[in-house]
Image (tube, helix red, strand yellow):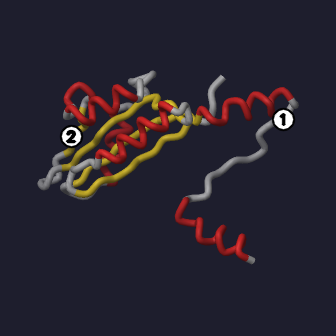
């Protein structure tokens, strides 16, 4: 049984990654909050040329962080997926494409199924909408 599976695309200006991001990703995996099912790095240079960076060609810090996450199903991300992400990028920028499983939700899912619960709807509220939620909580 799997928890919810999400894809996340995160952009970075200047084709530079911050080690904090990788540390936080590794920490979430170590705490078994998420599992990284696949990951790709897509970069667009100053001339607009696109490069999908293979895991074996990543710099040492990034490669170590990805190894730390124990990518379990590499191959889920297709060339079509990386092409779609590349279309979102400005020149001289990069993006990380992650497919993650929300491990924290597996026990909840199991309990819901055991109680004959069924999913009627789902969605996601973007974190930028948090101000709306905070305003309602203050009332």
Q: In the picture, which quadrant includes the N terminus?
A: top right
Residue 124's x, y, as percent? 62, 53
Q: Nearer the viewer, mark 1 or mark 2?
A: 1
Quick one: which residue is furthest to the left in this view?
47
Q: Name the image quarter holding residue 61.
A: top left
Residue 125's x, y, as percent? 61, 58
Label disc, if present, on residue 117 of the rendered structure: 1
For the point 63% across and 71% down, the residue is: 132
For the point 28% across and 49% down, the residue is: 18
Relative to residue 40, is residue 125 depicted above or below? below
Residue 9's x, y, as percent? 41, 47
Spatial distance from mark 1 to mark 2, Cα to Cα? 45 Å
Horizontal arrangement in the rendering, residue 36 relative to residue 63 (left or right): right
Q: Nearer the viewer, residue 88 or 34?
A: 34
Residue 27's x, y, as percent? 45, 37
For the point 46% across and 35% down, the residue is: 99
Q: Residues within 10 Å of mark 2 (few under 14, many from 20)?
A: some
Q: Which residue is disc 2 drawn over?
A: 51
Q: Residues within 10 Å of mark 1 (few under 14, many from 20)?
A: few
């Amino acid at each position: 049984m799997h928890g919810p599976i999400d894809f996340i695309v995160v952009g970075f200006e200047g084709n530079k990654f911050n080690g904090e991001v990788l540390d936080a990703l590794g920490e979430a995996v170590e705490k078994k909050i998420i599992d990284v099912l696949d990951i790709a790095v897509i970069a667009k240079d100053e001339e607009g040329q696109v490069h999908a960076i293979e895991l074996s060609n990543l710099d040492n810090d990034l490669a170590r962080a990805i190894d730390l996450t124990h990518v379990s199903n590499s191959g889920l991300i297709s060339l079509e997926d990386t092409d779609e992400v590349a279309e979102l990028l400005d020149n001289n920028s990069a993006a990380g494409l992650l497919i993650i499983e929300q491990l924290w939700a597996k026990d909840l899912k199991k309990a819901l199924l055991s109680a004959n619960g069924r999913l009627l709807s789902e969605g996601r509220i973007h974190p930028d909408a948090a101000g709306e939620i905070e305003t309602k909580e203050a009332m």
